[in-house]
Image: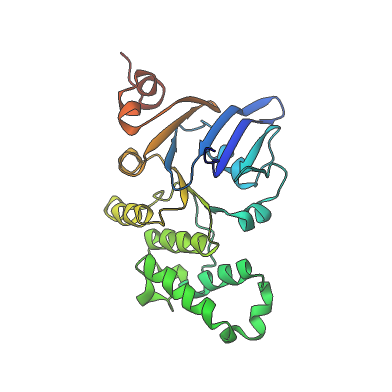
Amino acid sequence: MSELPVLEARELNKAFGPIAVTRNVNMSLMRGERRALIGPNGAGKTTFVNLLSGRLRPTTGNVFLNGIDVSRADEATRSKLGIGRTFQITSLFPALTAHENIFLALAESAGFGMHILRSARSYGSLHDRADELLEKVGLLGAAATSVQQFPYGQQRLIEIAVALALEPKVLLLDEPAAGIPTSERDLILDIVKALPSDIAVLLIDHDMDLVFRFAQRITVLVQGAILVEGSPAEIAADQSVRDVYLGERS
């Protein structure tokens, strides 16, 4: 029996009134796959990711996680089932420390919620795990520093650590390099490339250097529909991609 996709979109459509922003999208993401989603501004990339994560409900079509239809499940439910997400703009608690941000995500995942406030130090294993995740992104030495004191690039690393705290089967990275100086982008790429090999990763970004260095496979979205999919070499050589995305003409 062939392996099921860990995440699958089938005939996914989303319309806001008369405006169709996602059009008949079919995409399968296998366990451990490294996929990039690219397209020009307004292509519908973030809408599509919102449909996958549960932030938006599809007008028609379905989303499957490990073969289970989660199309009507909300974002929190999908997160608990294994869909992790980062955003174009960081969604951290800026006044809390790096450690506290990750600890809160771990506590929520473990079902403790706000009860942690009664006896936070009693959850030693969660604190240890928070330190492990900070070490994974190279920030253990700054665990007690408030997030608002970190450069933006390091805040993105903390956000990735928070997403990993939920032990996702799929990680959706929405423009992790957005707003980061060029000099810091290799740091983001190194961390993303070092993510656990069993996690499927879908990277959405405009940085073509980052995309082509990361992805095993690339999906090109144009006007809400898939134009073409292929390896980085195939996408780089595709004239239709040059025409609509890179702005070239033959």
Which residue appears farthest toward the left when viewing the image? 183
Name the residue located 62 percent from the left edge and 32 percent from the top edge: 10
Give coordinates of residue 78: x percent, y percent: 64, 52
Residue 58 screen position, x and y as percent: 68, 36
| Residue 216 image point, x, y percent | 36, 39
Which of the 4 image quadrants contains residue 155? Answer: bottom left
- Give residue 106's position: percent from left, percent from top: 56, 69
Residue 56 in the figure: left or right of residue 208:
right
Q: Residue at the top extreme? A: 250
Quadrant assignment, res 156: bottom left
Is the residue 183 above or below the residue 166 in the image? above
Please identify the quadrant where the C terminus is shown.
Answer: top left
Can residue 95 be seen here? The reply is: no
Would residue 112 be seen by someone viewing this image from the given angle? yes
Snapshot quadrant of residue 11: top right
Q: Quadrant of the N terminus?
A: top right
Report whether 133 appears left or right of 242.
right
The residue depicted at 48 percent of the width and 73 percent of the height is: 130
Residue drawn 54% across and 41% down? 5
Above or below for 130 versus 154: below
